[in-house]
């Protein structure tokens, strides 16, 4: 493709992008296809000769687009959002255009220094202590793995990095029964062993019971285990439950455990002073992760990871082959040593565009609105007969189930709700997902789309009620 052809197609594409974003509600949120439907339309092998861009783009529209789940759709209330925004998309265009690989300061000084500054902005925005240093990771899963590895190395004076595990099964990690599956994955990869991940029971609000946490730690120490880390959650995936991070912090300090706070989704709400008040002591942790790629209008992927002991992180990951040595090594951050991959995308640019476009007040307004939509839906459910609220609603995730009067058999209720959800989603107007709380099938509704409004939320709720 020549430069002139690129210019032409890029203009066409931008028009298409703006049309897409402006007409999202015309698409079904989910495609409703069968496995293989898309693959069956793709040739068995790569073309021998190059094809022209018109054909490729036309195939994108006819084959790929109908096979997409539209995550930015106003009827998308599933999982947690991966919301983006116009400024973030524009930044991604520039990032792709420059195509820089930002592993060292030298490989793009602006990328490294902007990332440093953005992480300082984020730290202050969320009210985290100044002692924290931030770095962008590709995902929360990576950040949690990095936290567990750093905890492991700090605890063993970096011996496992050098010699491998002395013997299996000596270290313990704790989270609640509501902790995210990325913790299980991190524990597996870090060589700690799934049997050494203890899932602490929760209270009626699905928050970790600190009395049981402390009992488990005491029991483990008596049995010869070494308590390594506690992963607490600020906003669990199932119900947005808030673990008492302050109390967990004190327990960790008492027993010399690393405390990692997984605030992947709800961490964004900490930019509101009134939410920060809910969570005294959240800064008493060793590491903290929040995903701007979930609820902060920034394209996937962008995960902000904060750590108190930056040197422990670097000592855990640093590798310095001759070909990567630079004259500035002592003066700058070389982010290749701050996580698992060597190569890194330039992710700070989109964050910079987003934060500057909305400003702190603009982002706070959006987050406050989203929380208000959640509270509106909660109130709506509480006054509707035949619908049951299934968990507290701290922010904008509402867990509910249909519960017709007189039907109290749990198996029938599970069945009814599973079928209802299938029908609701089949409409293509909205997309919701489910979880289980106390063993019960529960439908989740998240109002966190960038352009969510009272209208999109009420429309979504109307569709749900129509199909029930
Ligand atoms: C989404 C989520 C994760 C995983 O995030 P990734 O960035 O996709 O790895 C971890 N923990 C919680 C609480 C989450 O909601």
Image: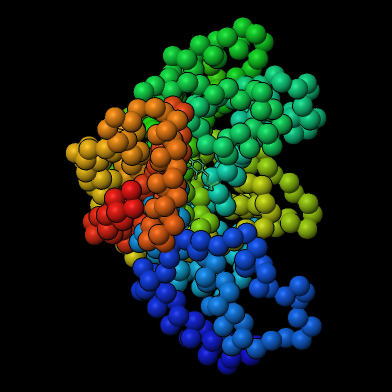
Residue name at image x 61 percent, y 71 percent: 99
Residue name at image x 43 percent, y 18 percent: 210
Which quadrant would the N terminus be assigned to in this image? Answer: bottom right
**Left or right: 228 as drawn, with respect to 463:** right
- Residue located farthest toward the bottom when viewing the structure as drawn: 4
Image coordinates for residue 182, horizontal then vertical, percent: 58, 39
Residue 410, quarter of the rendered image = top left
Residue 205, quarter of the rendered image = top left
Against 353, residue 168 (above or below) is: above
- Residue located farthest toward the front when viewing the structure as drawn: 406
Image coordinates for residue 142, horizontal then vertical, percent: 60, 45
Q: Is residue 238 visible?
A: no
The foreground one among 252 and 423 is: 423
Q: How is the image coloured?
A: rainbow
Residue name at image x 65 percent, y 88 percent: 52
Residue 144, quarter of the rendered image = top right
Q: Is residue 38 visible?
A: yes
**Left or right: 41 as drawn, with respect to 120:** right
**Left or right: 96 as drawn, with respect to 352:** right
Against 92, residue 184 (above or below) is: above
């Amino acid at each position: 493709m020549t430069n002139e052809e690129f210019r032409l197609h890029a203009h066409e594409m931008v028009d298409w992008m703006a049309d897409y974003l402006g007409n999202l509600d015309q698409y079904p949120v989910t495609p409703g296809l069968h496995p293989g439907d898309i693959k069956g339309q793709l040739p068995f092998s790569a073309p021998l000769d190059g094809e022209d861009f018109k054909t490729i783009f036309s195939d994108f529209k006819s084959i790929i687009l109908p096979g997409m789940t539209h995550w930015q759709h106003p009827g998308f209330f599933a999982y947690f959002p991966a919301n983006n925004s116009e400024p973030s998309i524009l930044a991604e265009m520039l990032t792709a255009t420059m195509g820089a690989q930002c592993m060292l300061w030298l490989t793009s000084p602006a990328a490294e220094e902007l990332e440093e500054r953005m992480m300082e902005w984020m730290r202050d925005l969320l009210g985290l202590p100044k002692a924290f240093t931030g770095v962008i990771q590709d995902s929360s899963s990576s950040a949690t793995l990095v936290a567990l590895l750093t905890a492991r190395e700090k605890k063993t004076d970096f011996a496992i990095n050098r010699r491998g595990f002395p013997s299996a099964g000596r270290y313990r990690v704790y989270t609640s029964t509501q902790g995210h599956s990325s913790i299980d994955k991190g524990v597996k990869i870090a060589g700690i062993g799934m049997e050494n991940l203890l899932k602490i029971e929760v209270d009626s609000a699905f928050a970790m019971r600190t009395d049981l946490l402390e009992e488990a730690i005491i029991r483990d120490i008596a049995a010869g285990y070494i308590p390594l880390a506690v992963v607490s959650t600020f906003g669990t995936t199932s119900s947005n439950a808030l673990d008492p991070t302050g109390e967990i912090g004190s327990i960790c300090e008492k027993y010399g455990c690393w405390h990692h706070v997984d605030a992947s989704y709800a961490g964004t709400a900490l930019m509101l002073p009134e939410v920060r008040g809910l969570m005294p002591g959240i800064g008493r942790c060793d590491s903290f992760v929040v995903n701007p790629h979930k609820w902060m209008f920034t394209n996937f992927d962008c995960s902000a990871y904060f750590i108190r002991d930056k040197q422990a992180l670097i000592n855990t990951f640093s590798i310095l082959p001759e070909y990567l040595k630079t004259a500035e090594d002592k003066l700058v951050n070389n982010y290749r040593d701050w996580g698992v991959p060597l190569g890194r995308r330039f992710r700070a640019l989109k964050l910079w565009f987003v934060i500057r476009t909305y400003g702190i007040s603009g982002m706070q307004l959006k987050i406050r609105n989203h929380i208000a939509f959640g509270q509106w839906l909660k109130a709506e459910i509480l006054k509707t007969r035949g619908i049951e609220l299934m968990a507290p609603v701290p922010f904008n995730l509402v867990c509910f189930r249909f519960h017709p009067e007189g039907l109290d058999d749990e198996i029938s209720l599970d069945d009814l709700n599973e079928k209802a959800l299938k029908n609701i989603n089949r409409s293509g107007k909205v997309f919701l997902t489910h979880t289980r709380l106390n063993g019960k099938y529960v439908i989740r509704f998240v109002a966190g789309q960038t352009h969510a409004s009272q209208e999109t939320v009420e429309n979504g709720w109307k569709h749900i009620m129509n199909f029930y």
